[in-house]
Image (cartoon, helix red, strand yellow):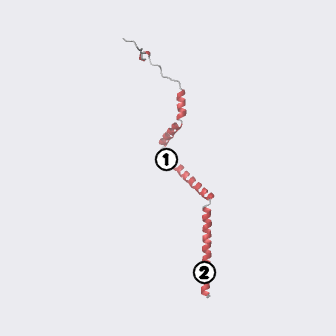
Amino acid sequence: MSDEGEASLAVAEARSVRARQRLAGTLVEIQARLNPKALAREAAQELREAGQELAREGLETVKRHPLTVAGMVGAVGLFLARKPIRALIAKLPDETPPPPPRLTPKPRTRGKSR
């Protein structure tokens, strides 16, 4: 073999070694990314960031429309407490007075004709 052929072979082998090293590095990186713990950690971080953004937007909305938000919170609170409120109202005494005697209908008797 000539010196030129040996040199190009050495260059090709060096390129091949570097390509294998890059491929091995890429495979290690892919394995690290696909590790279940790493995926869970990344998903938790994304959820945390999304929650923080949602909280910031909610706070800005409350600052812009405080009465609307207070009304909505009150309505939701009443809706959620409807059963206890109903029970409290049912325990209250009946304050409705009986009707006056002249408004009570007279009982009808059967079989008597006038």
Establish if 90 lies above or below 66.
Answer: above
Q: Nearer the viewer, residue 71 or 35?
A: 35
Classify residue 33 as left or right of residue 102: right
**Residue position for label 2:** 11
How busy is the neighbourhood of tag 1: few (under 14 within 10 Å), some, or many (20 plus)? Answer: few
- Quick one: SS at disc 1? helix
Quarter in which the N terminus is drawn: bottom right
Residue 52 position, x and y percent, is 55, 51
Residue 58 position, x and y percent, is 51, 48
Q: Nearer the viewer, residue 110 or 101?
A: 110
Establish if 54 lies above or below 107.
Answer: below
Distance between the alpha carbons at the discs numbered 2 and 1: 64 Å
Which residue ends up furthest to the left in the rendered image? 114
Residue 61's tag is 1
Which amino acid, mark 2? Val
Which amino acid, mark 1? Thr
